[in-house]
């Protein structure tokens, strides 16, 4: 990485002042990139692009069923704060094209054209991978994404993921059910790789949620004062290095999914009726999926080809898909609307990453027709952005929080200023 031809060499040299005190070094477990590269790539390339991307009209409206409709136990909503409820979009606000039914290729395009003059065989290879937005159910998630009844559009920019006051037995029950029934923590060296991946994905997402709570916390309810809570960051995440590692793992896993489908994502229609904004969206997606720095420094963030190899591969895949669907169903039991919104979005984002990585062959999705829904792509990119924010926050604030909170050295200022 330190060769002069490395596109990140300029970047890393700027960051080198802190390399000696780095706690996380070497390859991110089960991935193909090291911590240093992830941090510098995130800072220089991914974070700036994603921050812009999620504010575009295409990526800021998410379709979601916000009903709390828990299939496992009666609603025990514990939300106390006004910040917990979601501000839904009025009909007039969200993009016109989002309201229309999907229209991909017409039936005529798909049937045999024998006998017509235009029926002579064109032997050039079809490079068009994206064939219009379609509505298909994601096999990894519980919600039927084709069912538009009760769905509302939410402007994600108006509903940031942050502290909501959702805590106590209700929240704990969800996490506990997820970990005990659907993705138990593997005893070291025992579990198969695939189950380990599922656990690490959920744990990494959990870390990211905790990081967002810590980075945007209600420090003083009376004065409505918001800020960082580094003590919480330390207690819930940094104190457990495995949770930090899982956060990086999840980030690389989702990044791999995005970079596995570059042509599809580049060709997709980012149409909201606002030409200027839509061109900007497309350009940002292109910058992300074909990024030369990313391709050079971390060409394969995660190698999915190693999974499902054994004899029991197909059976195992079904089992893990079922477990993930259960986790997705549990999102309907989250007793706080805003947490439910982000929980559903991020689980759909992970489900979309799983769909991209495991429903098509390695590098060969052209013939197998990857098909994504608009909402899946919105969830995928917003999830990647959330993870990128968390990785950046842990990288920027982690060492300080470890010193001040972890080292129990009392800060010269008040607790709130942490
Ligand atoms: C889907 C979902 C979304 C949420 N979104 C928000 C939100 O946007 N804002 C908000 O304020 N609250 C949110 N919450 C609540 C929040 O996650 C916590 O549950 C709550 O703040 C209480 O925290 P806690 O300290 O009890 O530990 P919790 O975070 O509830 O953790 C419970 C237990 O899980 C284990 N654990 C914790 N972190 C990890 C990890 N990374 N990997 C593996 N195991 C772990 C520990 O044993 C811990 O005791 C959400 C909860 C859920 C289920």
Image: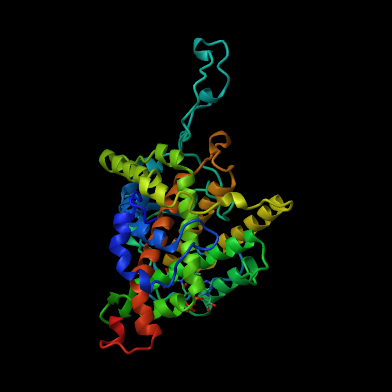
The residue shown at (44%, 38%) is 263
- Which quadrant of the view contains residue 417? bottom left
Q: Is residue 41 above or below residue 372?
A: below
* Residue 195 image offset from top left, x and y in percent: 63, 62
* Residue 230 image offset from top left, x and y in percent: 36, 78
The residue shown at (58%, 36%) is 368
Badge count: 0
Q: Is residue 144 above or below residue 232?
A: above
Which residue is more in the foreground, 101 or 378? 378
* Residue 183 image offset from top left, x and y in percent: 62, 66
Q: Is residue 138 visible?
A: no
Where's the N terminus, which quadrant?
Answer: bottom left
The residue shown at (29%, 87%) is 411
Where's the C terminus, which quadrant?
Answer: bottom left
The residue shown at (42%, 73%) is 23
Which residue is more in the foreground, 71 or 385? 385
* Residue 224 image offset from top left, x and y in percent: 27, 77
Which residue is more in the foreground, 97 or 211? 211
Give the residue furthest to the right: 311
Q: Is residue 390 above or below residue 384?
A: below
- Which quadrant of the view contains residue 396? bottom left
Horizontal side, residue 354 vs residue 210: left or right: right
């Amino acid at each position: 990485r330190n060769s002069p031809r490395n596109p990140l060499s300029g970047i890393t040299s700027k960051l080198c002042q802190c390399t000696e005190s780095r706690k996380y070094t070497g390859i991110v477990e089960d991935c193909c990139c090291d911590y240093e590269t992830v941090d510098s790539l995130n800072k220089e390339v991914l974070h700036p692009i994603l921050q812009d991307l999620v504010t575009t009209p295409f990526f800021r409206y998410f379709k979601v069923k916000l009903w709390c409709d828990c299939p496992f136990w009666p609603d025990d909503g514990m939300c106390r704060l006004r910040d917990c409820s979601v501000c839904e979009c009025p009909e007039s606000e969200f993009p016109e094209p989002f309201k229309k039914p999907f229209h991909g290729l017409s039936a005529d395009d798909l049937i045999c054209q024998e006998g017509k003059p235009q029926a002579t065989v064109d032997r050039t290879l079809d490079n068009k991978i994206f064939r219009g937005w379609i509505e298909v159910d994601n096999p990894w998630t519980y919600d039927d994404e084709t069912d538009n009844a009760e769905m509302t559009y939410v402007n994600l920019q108006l509903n940031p993921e942050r502290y909501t006051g959702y805590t106590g037995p209700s929240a704990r029950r969800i996490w506990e059910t997820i970990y005990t029934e659907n993705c138990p923590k593997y005893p070291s060296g025992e579990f198969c790789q695939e189950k380990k991946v599922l656990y690490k994905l959920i744990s990494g997402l959990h870390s990211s949620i905790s990081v967002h709570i810590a980075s945007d916390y209600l420090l003083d309810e009376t004065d409505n004062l918001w800020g960082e809570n580094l003590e919480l960051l330390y207690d819930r995440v940094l104190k457990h290095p495995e949770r930090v590692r899982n956060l990086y793992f999840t980030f690389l896993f989702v990044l791999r999914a995005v970079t596995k489908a570059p042509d599809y994502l580049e060709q997709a229609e980012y149409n909201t009726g606002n030409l200027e904004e839509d061109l900007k969206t497309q350009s940002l997606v292109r910058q992300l999926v074909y990024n030369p720095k990313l391709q050079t420094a971390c060409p394969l963030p995660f190698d999915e080809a190693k999974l499902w190899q054994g004899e029991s591969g197909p059976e195992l895949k079904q089992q893990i898909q079922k477990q993930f669907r259960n986790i997705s169903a549990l999102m309907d039991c989250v007793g706080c609307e805003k947490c439910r919104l982000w929980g559903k979005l991020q689980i759909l984002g992970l489900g979309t990453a799983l769909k991209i990585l495991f429903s098509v062959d390695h590098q060969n999705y052209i013939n197998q027709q990857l098909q994504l829904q608009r909402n899946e792509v919105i969830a995928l990119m917003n999830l990647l952005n959330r993870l990128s924010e968390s990785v950046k926050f842990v990288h920027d604030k982690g060492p300080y929080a470890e010193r001040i909170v972890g080292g129990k050295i009392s800060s010269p200022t008040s607790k709130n200023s942490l």
